[in-house]
Image: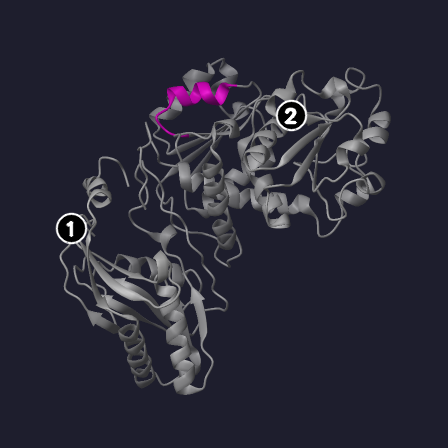
């Protein structure tokens, strides 16, 4: 790993992504054991610094840390002095004085994990910042596809939904392209960020065409409250046009897999029957999330300052 | 390992001048050793049905398979073979540099009440076996654990004993001992080589 922190997939080289995925595949084996714990990070401290609540991601990091024997401390605004108007950077400095070995940061504003990383001597893992990146989600999606398809190179991945507000979409666009897949995005034009073609993706507004030949259909969550009226006329209309159900899935390849970062709005972006399909890819994504985060913690925790130029095992 | 580690300094030297190689055990020698060790295992253990051969990657795995084949031939009883990576149990993991790559772990059946034969290629400080025992115990409670090493090169740092040795090879700490097969893999005929001059200390 070249950098000390994991702030975004955009910063990673393909061989670094491969290293993380390879490590995660070994971590999956730990998760299948009866005693799901190894002593690797014993005596090390992981701080989950979540300015924006996210039970799933926080729990996933917490379990990952505990399976590696780290001491896990959860720190979130409601239980801390953030309500007393302490600034984010003050908080970061205070945490740094507690000598954590790795800090996981989630914030609703893009760039906050980077600012915090600049203040800390411990490595920072971005657990989602605004509409910027959510690298561990993309990495676990890559891991899931690799398991389902046996490869990523040469696949066609169609991302459907609110790409504009989605850090998951951005991280996945970088990740899948770096690993050799073709990425298409499909959504109402109001939910496609201007200039996204510059990232190398193909924008296809017609869903049928976007799904044609797709190996992976990645469905994004629609935030109903925020979007209805402003970005599309009605939920019903969105669902009829872009909601993925069995009928629309026929446009994709026969063996296409459907993914969703969760939580699902059933009957909105994904139909009930696909959400409940067994064996389902969505729960595999959750399971892979723990192994992937174990891999990330193993590779990053405890690293300080500038990384060495040459690794040696 | 970290950049400041004195060990890292040997890397450029190693790349610059070809290290001196000395083959200390060839494929036939390795096979003979593993036949002899299989006989010793049979001699020392009564309940051969409880044997569970566990190889430590990478070098221990082909040796464990070969040893299990030998035991099957001698006793007629099938022997379970497992693979146990010790990396997550190492005591030298957390510097500021790169983490060592993880390797495969595959434990096909429970170790409870089994006689586990741990197989490593080169036994030296005892740290790998210490890590392997910790890993093993996470999989259950073996009745007994015995250790096989193809090469014992000395330099013990922990009070750990070895039960079956292929060959004792006194070495200097500056030398490296590796088991290797065809073209840097562990396939095909194996040999044990001592690398000196520019090799890292271990």
Q: Is residue A164 left or right of residue A238?
A: left
Which residue lies under the disc numbered 2? Answer: A166
Picture quadrant where residue A224 is located: top right
Q: Does the magenta portion include A232? A: no
Q: Nearer the viewer, residue B33 or A123?
A: B33
Protein chain holding label 2: A
Q: Nearer the viewer, residue B160 or A274?
A: A274
Q: How is the image coloured?
A: one colour
Q: Is residue A128 above or below residue B66?
A: above
Q: Secondary structure at mark 1?
A: loop
Expressed as whole percent of the image width and height from the top left, the position of residue A2 reads 39, 32
Q: Which quadrant: the N terminus of chain A?
A: top left
Q: Is residue B196 above or below residue A112?
A: below
Q: Is residue A239 left or right of residue A97?
A: right
Expressed as whole percent of the image width and height from the top left, the position of residue B104 reads 45, 57
Q: Secondary structure at mark 2?
A: loop
Q: Is residue A253 above or below residue A236?
A: below
Residue at 46% x, 74% y is: B80
Q: Is residue A63 visible?
A: no
Q: Residues within 10 Å of mark 1 (few under 14, many from 20)?
A: some
Q: Main secondary structure of the magenta part?
A: helix
Q: Is residue B125 above or below residue A292?
A: below
Which residue lies under the disc numbered 1? Answer: B197
Residue at 46% x, 14% y is: A87
Task: Give the alpha-carbon distance from disc 1 to disc 2, as whole Å.
Answer: 55 Å
Q: Is residue A175 visible?
A: yes
Q: Does the magenta portion include A120? A: yes
Specify start and end residues of the magenta stretch as a single range: A111-123
Q: Nearer the viewer, residue A250 or A111?
A: A250
Q: Is residue B41 left or right of residue A12?
A: left
Q: Is residue A89 left or right of residue B172?
A: right
Q: Residues within 10 Å of mark 2 (few under 14, many from 20)?
A: many
């Amino acid at each position: 790993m070249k950098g000390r922190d994991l702030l975004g997939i955009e910063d990673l080289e393909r061989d670094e992504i491969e290293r993380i995925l390879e490590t995660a595949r070994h971590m999956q084996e730990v998760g299948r054991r009866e005693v799901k714990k190894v002593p690797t990070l014993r005596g090390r401290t992981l701080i989950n610094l979540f300015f924006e609540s996210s039970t799933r991601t926080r729990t996933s990091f917490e379990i990952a840390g505990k399976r590696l024997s780290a001491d896990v401390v959860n720190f979130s605004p409601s239980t801390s002095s953030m309500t007393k108007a302490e600034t984010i950077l003050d908080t970061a400095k205070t945490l740094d004085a507690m000598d954590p070995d790795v800090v996981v940061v989630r914030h609703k504003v893009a760039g906050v994990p980077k600012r915090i990383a600049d203040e800390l001597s411990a490595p920072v893992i971005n657990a989602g910042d605004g509409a910027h990146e959510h690298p561990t989600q993309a990495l676990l999606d890559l891991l899931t596809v690799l398991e389902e398809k046996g490869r990523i190179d040469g696949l066609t991945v169609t991302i459907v939904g609110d790409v504009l507000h989605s850090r998951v979409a951005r991280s996945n666009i970088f990740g899948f392209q770096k690993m050799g897949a073709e990425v298409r995005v499909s959504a109402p034009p109001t939910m496609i960020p201007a200039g996204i073609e510059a990232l190398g993706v193909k924008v296809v507004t017609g869903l049928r065409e976007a799904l044609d030949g797709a190996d992976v259909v990645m469905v994004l969550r629609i935030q109903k409250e925020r979007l209805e009226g402003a970005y599309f006329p009605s939920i019903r209309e969105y669902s009829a046009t872009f909601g993925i159900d069995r009928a629309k899935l026929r446009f994709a390849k026969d063996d296409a897999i459907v993914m969703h970062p969760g939580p699902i709005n059933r009957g909105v972006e994904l139909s009930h029957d696909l959400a409940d399909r067994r064996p389902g890819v969505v729960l595999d994504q959750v399971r892979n999330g723990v192994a992937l985060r174990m891999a990330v913690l193993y590779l990053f925790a405890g690293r300080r300052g500038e990384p060495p130029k040459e690794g040696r095992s | 390992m970290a950049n400041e580690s004195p060990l890292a300094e040997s890397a450029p030297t190693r790349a610059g001048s070809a290290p001196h190689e000395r083959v200390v055990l060839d494929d036939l020698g390795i096979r003979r050793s593993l036949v002899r060790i299989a006989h010793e295992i049979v001699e020392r253990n009564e309940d051969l049905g409880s044997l569970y051969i566990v190889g430590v990657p990478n070098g221990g795995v082909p040796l464990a398979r070969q040893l299990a084949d030998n035991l099957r031939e001698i006793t007629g009883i099938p022997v379970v073979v497992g693979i146990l990576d010790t990396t997550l149990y190492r005591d030298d993991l957390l510097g500021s540099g790169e983490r060592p790559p993880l390797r495969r772990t595959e434990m096909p059946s429970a170790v409870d009440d089994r006689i586990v034969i741990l197989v490593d290629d080169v036994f030296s400080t005892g740290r790998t076996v210490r890590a392997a025992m910790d890993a093993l115990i996470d999989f259950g409670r073996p009745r007994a654990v015995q250790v096989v090493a193809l090469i014992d090169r000395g330099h013990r740092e922990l009070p750990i004993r070895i039960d079956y040795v292929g060959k004792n090879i006194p070495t200097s700490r500056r030398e490296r001992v590796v088991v290797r097969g065809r073209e840097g893999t562990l396939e095909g005929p194996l040999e044990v080589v001592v690398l000196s001059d520019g090799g890292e200390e271990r």
